[in-house]
Amino acid sequence: MRTIHVDDIKDTVARLCWEACYYLPFDILDSFKKAEQREVSPLGKSILNQLIENAEVAATEHMPYCHDTGLAVVYVEVGQEVYLTGGSFQESIHAGVRKGYQEGFLRKSVVGDPLLRVNTNDNTPAVIHTEIVPGDQVKITLLPKGGGSENMSAMKFLLPGEGVEGVKKFVIETIEAAGGKACPPVIVGVGIGGSFDKVTAIAKEAILREVGVHHHETHIAELEKELLEEINKTGIGPQGLGGVNTALWVAVETYACHITALPVAVNIQCHAARKKSAVI
Ligand SMILES: O=C(O)C[C@H](O)C(=O)O
């Protein structure tokens, strides 16, 4: 067994909060540059250049890439040979978010009660997904999820007979309904299968996948390519002002499901596609 103190988890989460919000990942920045080269709309090109410049300024000035520094979604893979000591594991993650958002001067975007709507003023609580995995390490991934694109995400139970064509139709309808409100160019995470809860979980996991990496199964990789092409034919374009870059990438994750069901979820990630991991 390896002993890890929960304060290490807290400090790592805190660091990941501001690192994720200041430094856009390389794969996302690279996808902006490729999108700028393909873009045919002068306005679209200008927007993509502004996104690239914005990312560079945020990184050099150590400032948030976007004013919406998101709801902190935290994925933790805990090795089954790890002994966590020093207090509550869950509380150490919330404490890390509290510390990271305060010390990193990140906007606090969480209300404690969805109906009473009073800001918790420290961006807690986080949304925490924990998985027990082999090994003696703890891997933490921070996904600060912006509100605008999350609001445009959707889930639907299709009839199994609707098949892959039904899935494509639902994804395109969701992207068209989102239009400019999801801050395109977006990353589109699609979940297919599982249950009501699982399908949305895998759609969100999909947006964490590196841009440029397709699903390992050929028919799913083909679906990703077709969806990307169809989404970019909508003409919504950068910031919804027209162009050939509505999405930078589409990632599809699947899971087994009930014989009567074909659940589909579309989790839209705005161009502020922040994600950062660390291993303890
Ligand atoms: O939360 C916000 O500031 C706005 C939001 O991210 C949006 O996309 O409109």
Image: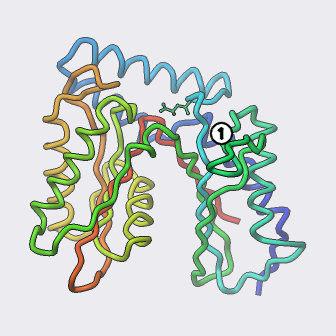
Left or right? Give the position of 220 relative to 2: left
Q: Is mark 1 within 8 Å of ligand 1?
A: yes
| Mark 1: few/some/many CA within 10 Å (<14, 14-19, 20+) | many
The residue most toward the front is 116
Q: Position of residue 235 (x, y in %)?
A: 17, 28
Q: Residue at x 15, y 67 (%)?
A: 219
Corner quadrant of residue 262? bottom left
Q: Position of residue 73 (x, y in %)?
A: 59, 55
Image quarter hosting the C terminus: bottom right
Image quarter hosting the N terminus: bottom right
The vertical placement of 83 against 48, above or below, is below
Q: Would you name the residue on which mark 1 appears?
A: 109
Corner quadrant of residue 105? top right
The vertical placement of 270 against 239, above or below, is below
94 or 223, nearer to the observer: 94
176 or 228, nearer to the observer: 176
Q: Secondary structure at mark 1?
A: loop
195 or 230, nearer to the observer: 195
Left or right? Give the position of 137 relative to 36: right
Q: Position of residue 151 (x, y in %)?
A: 44, 44
Amino acid carrying label 1: it is: Ser
Q: Which of the colour schemes (rainbow, by chain, secondary structure, one colour) is used?
A: rainbow
Q: Residue at x 81, y 37 (%)?
A: 103
Q: Residue at x 75, y 68 (%)?
A: 90
